[in-house]
Every structure is written in C-alpha cells, then in structure tokens.
Amino acid sequence: MIRVAEFVLPGHPDKFCDAIADAIIAEVLKVDADGYGQVEVSVWSDQVFLTGSVCTRRPIPVDFADVVVATGIEIGYTDGNHIDARKYRVTDTVCRNLGDPTRWTGHVNDQAICIGWAGYDEKVDWLPIEHWLAREFRDALYASCKRGRLKGHGPDGKLLVRVREEGDRWQLEHLLVTLQQRPETSFLDLCAGMAATLGGAYQTIQRNDPRWCVPWSEVELMLNPNGPLLNGGSDG
C-alpha cells in the first residue's frame, strides 16, 4: 500500500493563522476560564485580518495586534527575515463582549471535526506511519532552523512523504521539501544543510525502529524543486 502525507512548518501562512487564533483564545481563557471565542485569522502580504467575537466576564487587557506580533516573533518572523512580524498592519474587528460567556460556551462549543485513530504501536505514537514520519521530519527541520545547521532559515516550509507499506517493511520512497531561505545563503549550501538534517533524522528513526528498511541513499529526495524560496509566509 502506498501512503502519502504532508506537513507544514510553523511559518506557513495557514499554520501561522492557526497559531494566532490559538494565542488569542489563550488570552481569553487567562481572563475567564469559561471564556468564549470564535476568531478567524487571515494574512496577505504585510496585512493580518482578525474577525469574529469573544466574550468574557472581565475585559481582556491585551491588544490582539500585540498577540499577532508576539506569535510571529516566536515562530521566526524577525528582523533579517523576509517577514518581520513587527511590520504587520493588523486590522482587528473582533467584537469584545462583556458578559456571561456560558450562554455560548454551554451550548455551541461544537465547531470541530474529530477523527479517532489508534493503530500500530508506541514507536509511531499510534499514528498512521506516513503521518508520523512527516511530523518527525517537520520537527527536525524546524529545530534546525531555530538552533541548528539551518539556523535563520524558514520559518515557512512544507514537506511531503511517500511511504510504501508491505507488512512490517516500511519503505520511504520519496521526500519532497520546500523551505524558505535567507538570501545571503547560496542555494546549494541550503540544500546541503537540508539533506544533512533530514538524513540525520531518518537515520535516528531507523536506529529506533528497523521497520523503516530503505537506506537513506535510496530515498528519492527533492529539495526546493522550484528554486530558492525567499519571500515565504504571507508574502510568498
């Protein structure tokens, strides 16, 4: 069976929007454990749009624009990156209601789709193997962008894995990665750093679980196949 999964890095615009929304809800819950929040976030170029509504018993003392900036800086949108989160123009139209939030939270907090899964074993966190592997590669890349060989690159990026499962033989056939880079780094140096980071992560995975049976040298690896990605994130 051939299985495919995709993961994005924290600087991908979709993921960035999710992180902002989560951070706003966290501020709501700091003020009121019963707080209600229905917040939408979108980004385009140097603009961030916040819409929706929150309800708490006490005022929220935080400017949501500051939440946007803090989230971006934590992800890696800092000075020197193509995107500096402090330069975002934030349009905030979130309605801040004061009152009893349980009139909503007690009735309509059902806006999610939950899919259950329990399979394999603890070595892959009971997840589908392609999902687990893509997550491991994503985490290795982002860790390297924060403090390793790829430090300063990203934070936007995306990867796709293709795995062939034949019983207890899990064959990684194909790995495609696109990563945002700093302009002062040569394209070939970036690709070498990506290959080393991914290869090291895969070899660790193999040492811990022999079911990943294909040698790294036989994996089809595509790195930034469309060329350098400089203007990532909401401007990419």
Image: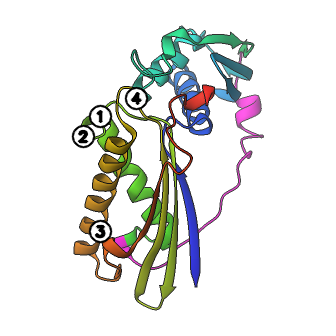
Question: Which residues fall within the magenta stretch?
Answer: 98-123
What amino acid is found at the position of numbered circle 2 in the picture?
Gly
- Please check the rendered image and state whether residue 125 is part of the magenta-colored stretch, yes or no: no
Mark 2 near mark 3, Cβ–Cβ under 8 Å?
Answer: no
Q: Which mark is residue 148?
A: 2
Q: Residues within 10 Å of mark 2 (few under 14, many from 20)?
A: some
- Sequence-wise, which precedes: disc 4 or disc 3? 4
Q: Residue at x 52, y 36 (%)?
A: 229
| Mark 4 vs mark 2, CA separation in Å | 15 Å
Check disc 3 and report the residue beneath it: 205
Mark 1 near mark 2, Cβ–Cβ under 8 Å?
Answer: yes
Q: Residue at x 76, y 30 (%)?
A: 103
In the displayed structure, does residue 217 sit left or right of residue 77? Answer: left
Check disc 4 and report the residue beneath it: 182
In the displayed structure, does residue 182 sit left or right of residue 163? Answer: left
| Mark 1 vs mark 2, CA separation in Å | 5 Å
